[in-house]
């Protein structure tokens, strides 16, 4: 049915004239200067002609390819219309910018407002379809129902156009919820499924500012692509002028997309152009071969290796295996290397003995070493032992000398110094306290430098 609709595809004379010009559309840049009365308009920089049969699925939200756009090129798409209250405002805004877009119309909406469908076409936009009833759970529908939705949607929009012309063979699945088999069906009918490269969430209950923010942020993140909007939402109407203005300020360009026909050949492209970011020679990438799908011949087809196939010639291997009662025997000898033989003791004796002066620590470094938490813990332990010895020996001289080697303690920490513990003759949790105090001492030591 769809094929017959496309076979009857006719154009009006005015359209034919435009199509004739499209032979060189890629080279034509309708800049803002071509938008009379709107000096700030972004305009439509070029039109590309695509062949749905050569590229049946596009949009990186779902697929690994998208329209062959240059950097900073944007394709505007609007779903779910026509709904006169908002669709007409969207058309007015686009007209004031001379910006061309693609409208994915719902068949039921077209039935209720055929004039709106014709307005979209008369304004020079691309008319595409979005199923008949916009089922929310398209992916859960039986395949036959999904096919019916698609075909009825095309039939309704065709009827609304009123002159026998068919919509462009561009299809957007409601909610982008593709069910199994629908892509194959669409391809068999010459339909191109349009996902998108980024939405602006304008179908959610968000503000117009949020729609604007998301549109710009997501576009900036990808650098180009298909923007998904809805022409039935007041927030989209409110956000669109600012989006278009900002696109121009930021150096983006609007691209219009039309389908190829017998007398309108597709814009020549390279396969790499259909990728959002084709691999560059400047970017290192790895392409691993895919794991092949092996066809199983069944478990019984593989011969079980006999023990004689193994290259182990140990005669008692079978005995050991049987004794251990396990299927995997150990190898007869360890595989790691044997220990090497050490040189004779006489050789070691010829090595020079280091002088004692090599281990002498300069006095200037001693203070820093003493300030380390590890040393403080050891020192606290040592002093605790020394204090006990001094008490037994009746000597207090050693304790006084130890105090002079300690760095200055910051105020407020003196009550927990190791000296206090030493004086008390007890050292509860010496490591913990030394660590806490050591931190303060280290700060003081750094300040001194
Ligand atoms: Zn929709």
Image (tube, helix red, strand yellow):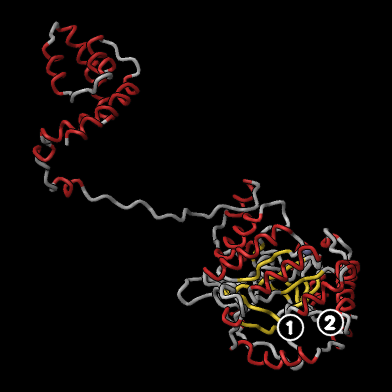
Image height check: is 369 above or below 243? Answer: above
Nearest to N terminus: mark 2 or mark 1: 2
Secondary structure of the residue carrying tag 1 is strand
Please state the total of marks drawn on the protein image: 2
What's the residue at 31%, 20% (across, down)? 430
Image height check: is 50 above or below 287? Answer: below
The residue tagged 2 is 166
Secondary structure of the residue carrying tag 2 is loop
Q: Residue 11 falls in which quadrant of the image?
A: bottom right
What's the residue at 40%, 55% (across, down)? 337
Q: Is residue 176 left or right of residue 307?
A: right
Marks 2 and 1: CB-CB under 8 Å? no
Relative depth, front residue between 222 and 139? 222
Residue 406 in percent (x, y) is at 17, 23
Relative depth, front residue between 207 and 104? 207
Q: In this view, does 204 lie to the left or right of 117?
A: left
Q: In this view, does 405 lie to the left or right of 427?
A: left
- The quadrant of the image that shows the C terminus is top left
Q: In this view, does 147 lie to the left or right of 326?
A: right
Does the rendering let one see residue 83? yes
CB of mark 1 near ligand 1 (< 8 Å): no
Residue 442 in percent (x, y) is at 25, 31
Q: Alpha-carbon distance for marks 2 and 1?
A: 11 Å
- The quadrant of the image that shows the N terminus is bottom right
Image height check: is 368 above or below 85? Answer: above
- Which quadrant of the picture is home to ligand 1? bottom right
Q: Residue 145 falls in which quadrant of the image?
A: bottom right
Image height check: is 343 above or below 275? Answer: above
Relative depth, front residue between 382 and 410? 410
The residue tagged 1 is 259
- Crowd rating for badge 2 (residues with CA inside 10 Å; few <14, some 14–19, many 20+): many
Relative depth, front residue between 85 and 105? 85
């Amino acid at each position: 049915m769809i094929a017959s609709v496309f076979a009857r595809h006719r154009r009006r004379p005015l359209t034919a004239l435009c199509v004739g010009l499209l032979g060189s559309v890629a080279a034509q840049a309708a800049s803002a200067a071509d938008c009379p009365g709107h000096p700030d308009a972004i305009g439509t920089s070029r039109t590309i002609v695509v062949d749905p049969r050569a590229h049946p699925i596009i949009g990186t939200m779902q697929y690994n390819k998208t329209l062959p756009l240059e950097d900073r090129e944007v394709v505007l798409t609007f779903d779910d219309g026509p709904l006169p209250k908002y669709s007409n405002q969207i058309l007015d805004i686009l007209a004031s910018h001379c910006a061309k877009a693609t409208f994915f119309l719902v068949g039921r909406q077209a039935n209720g407002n055929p004039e709106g469908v014709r307005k979209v076409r008369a304004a020079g936009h691309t008319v595409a379809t979005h199923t008949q009833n916009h089922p929310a759970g398209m992916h859960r529908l039986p395949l036959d129902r999904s096919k019916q939705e698609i075909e009825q949607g095309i039939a309704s929009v065709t009827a609304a156009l009123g002159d026998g012309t068919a919509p462009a063979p561009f299809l957007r699945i409601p909610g982008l919820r593709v069910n199994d088999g629908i892509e194959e069906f669409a391809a068999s009918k010459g339909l191109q499924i349009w996902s998108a490269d980024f939405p602006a969430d304008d179908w959610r209950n968000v503000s117009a500012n949020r729609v604007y923010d998301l549109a710009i942020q997501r576009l900036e993140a990808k650098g180009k692509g298909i923007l998904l909007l809805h022409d039935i939402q007041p927030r989209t109407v409110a956000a669109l002028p600012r989006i278009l203005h900002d696109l121009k300020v930021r150096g983006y360009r609007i691209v219009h997309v039309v389908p190829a026909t017998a007398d309108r050949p597709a814009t020549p492209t390279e396969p790499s152009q259909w990728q959002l970011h084709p691999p560059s020679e400047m970017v290192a990438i790895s392409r691993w071969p895919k794991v092949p799908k092996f066809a199983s011949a069944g478990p019984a087809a593989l011969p079980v290796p006999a023990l004689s196939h193994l290259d182990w010639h140990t005669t008692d291997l079978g005995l050991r295996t049987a004794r251990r009662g396990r299927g995997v025997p150990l190898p007869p000898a360890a595989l790691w290397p044997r220990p090497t033989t050490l040189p004779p003791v006489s050789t070691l004796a010829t090595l020079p003995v280091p002088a004692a002066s090599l281990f002498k620590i300069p006095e200037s470094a001693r203070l820093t070493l003493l300030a380390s938490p590890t040393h403080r813990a050891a020192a606290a332990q040592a002093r605790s032992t020394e204090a006990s010895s001094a008490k037994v020996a009746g000597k207090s001289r050693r304790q006084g000398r130890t105090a002079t080697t300690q760095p200055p303690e910051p105020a407020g920490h003196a009550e927990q110094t190791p000296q206090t513990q030493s004086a008390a003759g007890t050292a509860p949790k010496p490591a913990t306290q030394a660590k806490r105090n050591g931190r303060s001492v280290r700060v003081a030591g750094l300040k001194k430098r």
